[in-house]
């Protein structure tokens, strides 16, 4: 039975309504979609491609710790 692994995905939306998605576990692992469902399917494929390039997931160049919100006065 295949092993499941969870990956953090950051989701943003640009001014045109396009969803921009990225996985911080892999440098350069980004995609987009015109719907949230399309963006999530596209990032799933991007993550798989990034995983396929790595011999072992434990060798990832970064380790995801979490997200924090930072407030700045502009």
Image (tube, rainbow, N blue to C red):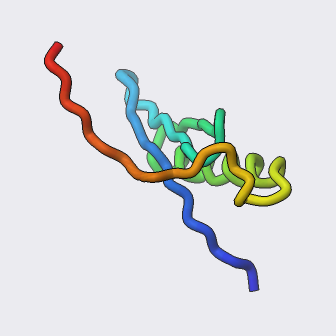
Foreground residue among 47 and 38: 47
Q: Quadrant of the N terminus?
A: bottom right
Residue at x-position 61% and y-position 45%: 62
Instruction: Tell me: residue 8, above or below residue 19.
Output: below
Residue 61 location in percent, x, y? 68, 44
The residue at 55%/65% (across/down) is 6
Q: Residue at x 31, y 44 (%)?
A: 68
For the C terminus, which image quadrant?
top left
Q: Is residue 38 above or below residue 31?
A: below
Give the left or right position of residue 25, taking residue 20 as reference.
right
Q: Quadrant of residue 46?
A: top right
Q: Quadrant of residue 28?
A: top right
Looking at the image, residue 29 sits to the left or right of residue 18; the answer is: right
**Left or right: where 24 falls relative to 13:** right
**Among all residues in the image, which is located at the extreme bottom?**
1
Q: Extreme left residue here?
A: 73
In the rendered image, residue 58, in percent from the top left (x then y), is placed at 71, 59
Q: Residue at x 74, y 79 (%)?
A: 2
Left or right of residue 63: residue 70? left
| 46, 59: nearer the viewer | 59
Q: Position of residue 13 (x, y in %)?
A: 38, 33
Residue farthest to the top? 74
Question: Residue 64: x and y, percent?
Answer: 51, 51
Of residues 62 and 33, the one drawn nearer to the viewer in this rendering: 62
**Which of these two is toward me, 68 or 33?**
68
């Amino acid at each position: 039975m295949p092993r499941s692994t969870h990956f953090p995905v950051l989701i943003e939306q640009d001014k045109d309504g396009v969803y921009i998605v990225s996985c911080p576990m892999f440098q350069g692992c980004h995609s987009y979609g015109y719907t949230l469902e399309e963006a999530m399917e596209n990032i799933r494929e991007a993550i798989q491609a990034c995983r396929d390039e790595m011999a072992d997931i434990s060798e990832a160049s970064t380790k995801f710790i979490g997200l924090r919100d930072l407030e700045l006065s502009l």
